[in-house]
């Protein structure tokens, strides 16, 4: 007796299934969230259920799988776009599981981070909690700093977290430059004063020129 194929494969093989087109879109390398937005409202609960199924199917994360690994990240992006309850914890879990301490980000975690960046203040608490679970000096802690900069504007906890990263990384030019950029993104006026004082102290010589260039841009209103 042959195994019953998974639901997503049944839908793909059934051209008459109401979710046929939406499922193919989720497997596409150029998946359009706007196109999925235009699907009948009555289908949305079924599309959401399908997205969770895609996220729970390990084989679909592989480049050799149908969809070349795009289906789960596409599903993740759509669930976040539709603000489906439970999506933020799943994003954080996937980021922690997929992040490689040696190689940094993979294609999947890159998409996860892009999805997080598109969200708002709801990601602050879980990202700060994730940071607390990481060892000092880990790449993921620094990456979290970048993810927090925009949604954390006006949040003192995020400012202090970025400051702590900056002060713990005084010998690494790339990390210092990255965190300086995110301090300016988080609170440009406060960051200008903070970074000016740090440069004058002479403790951050390895990244001095780059930080000064950032400060020039920030004072001229050219910093995003």
Image (cartoon, rainbow, N blue to C red):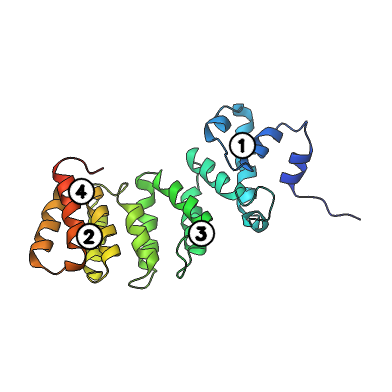
Q: Is tag 4's residue or tag 2's residue first in the polypeptide sequence?
A: 2
What x and y, as percent, mark residue 1? 91, 56
State the separation of the CA atoms marked 3 and 4. 29 Å
In the displayed structure, 29 sits above or below 19; it is below
Residue at disc 3, secondary structure: loop
Badge 3 or badge 4: first in the primary sequence: 3
The disc label shown at residue 187, or none: 4
Residue 26 position within the rendered picture, expressed as x and y whole percent measured from the top left: 62, 41
In what quadrant of the picture does the C terminus appear?
top left
Q: Do the CB atoms of the residues marked 2 and 1 lie less than 8 Å apart?
A: no
- State the residue position of label 2: 160
Residue 166 placement (x, y as % from top left): 23, 64
Label 2, label 1: how many angstroms apart (C-alpha)? 40 Å
Secondary structure of the residue carrying tag 2 is helix
Residue depicted at 21% across the width and 63% down the height: 207
Q: What residue sits right under mark 1 in the picture?
A: 45
């Amino acid at each position: 007796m042959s195994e019953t194929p998974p639901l997503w494969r049944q839908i793909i093989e059934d051209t008459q299934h109401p979710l046929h087109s939406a499922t193919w879109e989720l497997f596409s390398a150029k998946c359009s969230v706007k196109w999925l937005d235009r699907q009948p409202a009555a289908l949305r609960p079924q599309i959401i259920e399908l997205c969770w199924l895609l996220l729970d199917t390990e084989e679909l994360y592989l480049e050799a799988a149908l969809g070349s690994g795009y289906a789960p990240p596409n599903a993740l992006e759509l669930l976040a776009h539709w603000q489906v309850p439970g999506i933020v914890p799943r994003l954080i879990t996937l980021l922690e599981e997929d992040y490689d301490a040696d190689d940094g980000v993979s294609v999947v975690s890159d998409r996860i981070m892009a999805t997080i960046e598109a969200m708002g203040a709801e990601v602050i608490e879980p990202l700060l909690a994730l940071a607390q679970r990481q060892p000092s000096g880990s790449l993921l802690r620094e990456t979290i700093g970048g993810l927090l900069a925009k949604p954390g504007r006006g949040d003192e906890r995020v400012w202090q977290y970025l400051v702590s990263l900056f002060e713990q990384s005084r010998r690494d030019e790339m990390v210092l430059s990255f965190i300086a950029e995110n301090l300016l993104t988080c609170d440009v006026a406060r960051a200008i004063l903070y970074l000016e004082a740090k440069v004058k102290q002479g403790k951050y010589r390895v990244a001095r020129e780059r930080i000064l260039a950032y400060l020039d841009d920030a004072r001229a209103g050219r910093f995003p």
